[in-house]
Amino acid sequence: VLTHEVRNQSGSVWNANKIDLTHSFDFYFNVYLGCIDSTGADGITFILQPISTSVGSIGEGLGFEGVSPSVGISLDTWRNSRRNDPLFDHISIQLNGAVTHGNDLAGPVPASATSDNIEDCQWHVLRIRWDAAAKVLTTWFDVQFRLQAAYDLVSKVFNNDPMVYWGFSGATGGGFNLQQFCTS
């Protein structure tokens, strides 16, 4: 559980061991974004970062804002107009905890290929693949391709240090939802 149905909360869960981004990975997760649609918030982010296992912030920052250096794949369920959020629940690939859209590596696009709403009381499959040789980060939501970014994360984000933690963060603000994940 990243957040409960409570206002102004953040949570994060981290793998205690760093992974090496000179090696490819293909992760599958089950994610749950809650049941409250129109007033539910805020979303979760899959994060790669070398800093620590105790980062996070509340509200529209999704527990990711300000974490630098980092790369995040955000599932955002609340429209923050000042963050250039679209009207639909969306997914994007962002750098260094910058959650305002405009400089994304990829996106934002609808998180789901079949619905504008992912706060639907359902578990969904989030797949994230890193191809270390091609330097390509790709993500799928419920088996549908959503985004891809060709970017040298090790040299351009992590200052040539390939060792990073992976984990999830989530946050609520004025709106809230039960938000959780598990490896699948």
Image (cartoon, rainbow, N blue to C red):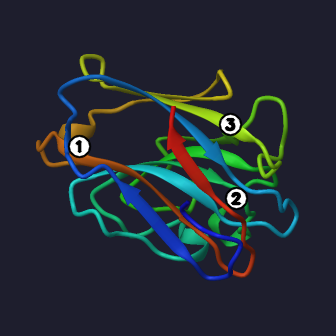
Residue beneath the point at 61% across and 44% down = 31
Quarter of the rendering containing residue 20? top left
Q: Nearer the viewer, residue 183 or 89?
A: 183
Question: Looking at the picture, which amino acid does disc 2 mark?
Answer: Asp
Residue 26 x/y as whole percent: 40, 24
What residue would you read off at disc 1?
Answer: 156
Distance CA(mark 2)–CA(mark 3): 21 Å
Establish if 99 lies above or below 58: above
What residue would you read off at disc 3?
Answer: 124
Q: Nearer the viewer, mark 1 or mark 3?
A: 3
Q: Residues within 10 Å of mark 1 (few under 14, many from 20)?
A: few
Residue 121 x/y as whole percent: 80, 49
* Mark closest to the chain's N terminus, 1 or 3: 3
Distance CA(mark 2)–CA(mark 1): 25 Å
Q: Nearer the viewer, residue 83 or 1?
A: 1
Question: Looking at the picture, which amino acid does disc 1 mark?
Answer: Lys
Q: Is 65 left or right of 155, judged from the image as shown?
A: right
Question: Looking at the picture, which amino acid does disc 3 mark?
Answer: His
Quarter of the rendering containing residue 150? top left
